Amino acid sequence: MIPIDTAATPTTAVVLGAGIAGLAMSRILADFLDSVIVIERHPLPADERARGGVPQAHHIHDLTTRGLGHLDEVFPGLDHELASAGSPLLDHGRDVHTCLPAGVAPRIGTGLQARLGSRALLEARIRDRVLGLPNVVLRTGQRVTGLVTDAMKTAIRAVIIGGERILPGDLIIDATGRFSRLPRWLAEAGFPTLPSRTIEAGFGYASCLLEAPGQPWLGLLHPTICPGRTRGAYIGKIEGHRWMVTLVGACGDHPPADADGFREFAHSLGNPEMTAFLQQAQPASRIRRYTRTENRRIDYHRMRTWPDRLLVTGDAVCAFNPVYGQGIDSALEQALLLRSLLSSRTDLTGLARDFQRRLPRTTTYAWHMSTFQDAMWARHRTARTTLSDRAISWYLHRLYRAAVQDPKTMEKFLQVFHRTKLPTTLLSPHVLAQICRRRLPATRAHVLEQDP
């Protein structure tokens, strides 16, 4: 442990939230401060069950190539632990059966690795590591109800627990998720706040665990595509030789949570590979639904007055539609940003402002990845599509067709998805040549021209 200022009194960080974002921040803080107190409203399981207050934990998760790299930086060796627990490692090009509108994408080795597994397993292994540190203390069953400022109202010095008890800290970190009450707490403490930006595409999904025999793939992806394909699905093999199936619906076209409706929704995709899989599978859990998938962002870095000693991270500052798998990667990247800032200073003063100003570097790319199609869906569901939407739809349909017919285009598409290449890769001369070279059937082209 390297204290920030060896001449100062012991330093303490108070982290609100014991999810992945809060635990990642706690892991970094434990290397620089004397103590870290983690406050969690819900009790935490002692094993690898899903914790309370996290409905997303019952749905499919994977870590992208970039996310795996960040995971290894924050928690060295954790990926090996996940592998030992049975979490499969897959090559997204070779091991995923990807069903695009124009057909099945080629199965090619790309080196773009993803780790499939349950959220409960990932959180349990992270939790064991962080809470096993000698200077990290967990307090569950406690609800934060407000903030305490200094006399000049320039810094946050403590949090209020249960409306009556004060817990001081040299740093206060809000990692309470997409339903964070921080905007209200700031307003009550006398700070001006900003409205949130929300992009709602009307996504909802339903998931369950299944027992099924082995397949020639580790994952099956049938993505939703605006505007013509509101329904989609993702099947992934996870630890315990089980499979998780997540059905997805955009624009309010949500899958049901009863067994018959769930299977009927899956069959409506017209995907023979999925239909064959479900015929061999047996349920291993009940079906769970989730519909709070809106993208929500608060640009705290734009606030003219930001209180010192307060950091906000994870979904509390920028929450993504979970369908696109950007949240965990972004949270880990924010923890690495904090490590970089702590490593370059000898005092905590001004750290919070620097962190919030630089945080958009960790969220902007993921925000665009998550809202690119969601913004189109949002306009489509209100019949307000634009000329730009039509142009993008035209391009994407031809990109998907090129990806089906040309392995190199498919590889570039996956590189962008895994954030190992910039989106401009999809405008490279090779990709553009493939898009211009291939024509859609006349009937399909006519349908696209008539889309509202």
Image (cartoon, rainbow, N blue to C red):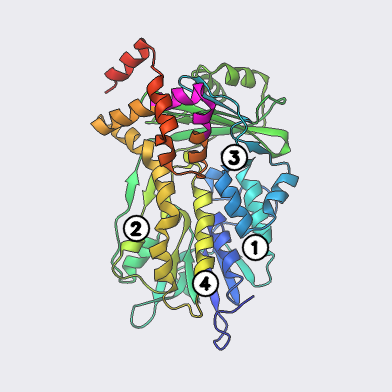
Secondary structure found at label 2: loop
Q: Earlier in the sequence, mark 2 or mark 4?
A: 2
Instruction: Name the quadrant of the C terminus.
Output: top left
Q: Determine the image quadrant of residue 436.
A: top left
In reply to whether residue 402 is colored magenta, the answer given is yes
Marks 3 and 4, how far apart at CA = 31 Å
The residue that mark 2 highlights is 299
Q: Which mark is residue 130?
A: 1
What mark, if any, has residue 112 been given in the picture?
Answer: 3
Q: Position of residue 320 (x, y in %)?
A: 43, 46
Q: Nearer the viewer, mark 1 or mark 2?
A: 2
First reached walking from the N terminus: tag 4 or tag 1: 1
427 over 344 or under it: above or below: above
Question: What kind of element bears circle 1?
Answer: helix
- Locate residue 403, reporting x and y percent: 48, 26
Calculate the distance from the C-alpha at mark 3 to the C-alpha at mark 2: 32 Å
- Residue in the foreground of this view, choosing between 359 and 33: 359
Q: Which dot, 3 or 2, sits closer to the camera?
A: 3
Q: Residues within 10 Å of mark 3 (few under 14, many from 20)?
A: many
Q: Given the current orientation, which residue lies at the most extreme top position?
A: 443
Instruction: Give the spatial CA distance, label 4 vs label 1.
Output: 18 Å
